[in-house]
Image (tube, grey):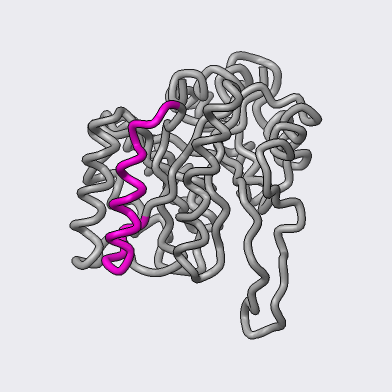
Amino acid sequence: MLSDAHRHLGVLPAYPFYGGPPVNPDTTARATIKQLIADLDAEGTDRALVIPNYGVPDPDVAFGFNELVIEAAQRDDRIRAGLWVSPRPEDEHRTARALKLAGEDGVRALKLSFLLGGRPTDPACRPQLDRIFAVARQHDLVVHVHTSPGAASDIDEVGHLVDWYAEDVPVHLVHFGGGMSGHIKLAGSRFFDWIAAGKRVYTDLSWAIGFTPYWLAAEIDRRGIGGDRVLFASDQPWGDFAGEYARMTSAVGGGPLRDLVFRDTFAALYP
């Protein structure tokens, strides 16, 4: 079986990123559940966590896809839904509506990112973070957190969420730190230190720099822990399913780690 722990649903409006003309860079974005299911069939993907597409600075867009991902999860048992939430105080009413959906059938995660503003150590964000994690705890959900650099969400900031909340709420660190510094901090010690301390921390290596999956696999083998904390993820349409699959297959080989990364850890974390 092949499970994908991170992909998106919904088509974003064109936007003038970085001062250029309005563009749609996510060319393989899917607008409908039928299109999503066709992709899963073509890939041979047996299970998938599906999250609202996001990236334009209009919070109503990502929040507006929450009902769509729930519908997808309730239509096809291969799909699990992750709901878009936000720790920003200006999104409080939107997040409150999203959290009311946390008990719906098929919901397994709450997704947050600081790419559109805020940071974990901003006191204005802490009340919303407390609410998000409280709901995750209540419904036994995973909190799925973007870690890429280029905004306030580097691993030093996002790592506070593991320290504060991952004792009893699973935290999935998307992109394994998202860049060179994050990769080295996590694979060098921090990821394993959290596991040894009893933190419920997980990760995927979508978008990771090429050496990282191989180094992480070697560290898992050397240390004897962490193999059950790594998941395969495509990040479609922002990632590349074929490329991510080939790289992770090469890095983890054909033994027990492959089964964990591509199947068993997803089954345990997103049942």
Q: Identify the residue at horizontal 45%, vertical 67% (top origin).
A: 116
User: Residue 224, position in %: x, y?
Assistant: 45, 21
Which portion, as a residue range, is magenta? 86-105
Between residues 65 and 80, which one lies in front from this camera angle? 65
User: Residue 227, position in %: x, y?
Assistant: 50, 24
Q: Identify the residue at horizontal 59%, vertical 14% (top origin).
A: 256
**Quadrant assignment, res 261:** top right
Quadrant of the frame with the N terminus:
top right
Indicate left or right for 26 with 221 as reference.
right
Between residues 126 and 173, which one lies in front from this camera angle? 126
Q: For residue 236, say whether it is visible.
A: yes
User: Residue pushed farthest top?
Assistant: 256
Q: Is residue 93 magenta?
A: yes
**Quadrant assignment, res 168:** top left
Q: For residue 212, say whether it is visible.
A: no
Indicate left or right for 89 with 217 as reference.
left
Q: Identify the residue at horizontal 50%, vertical 28% (top origin).
A: 220
Indicate left or right for 177 with 207 as reference.
left
Between residues 175 and 181, which one lies in front from this camera angle? 175
Q: Is residue 16 magenta?
A: no
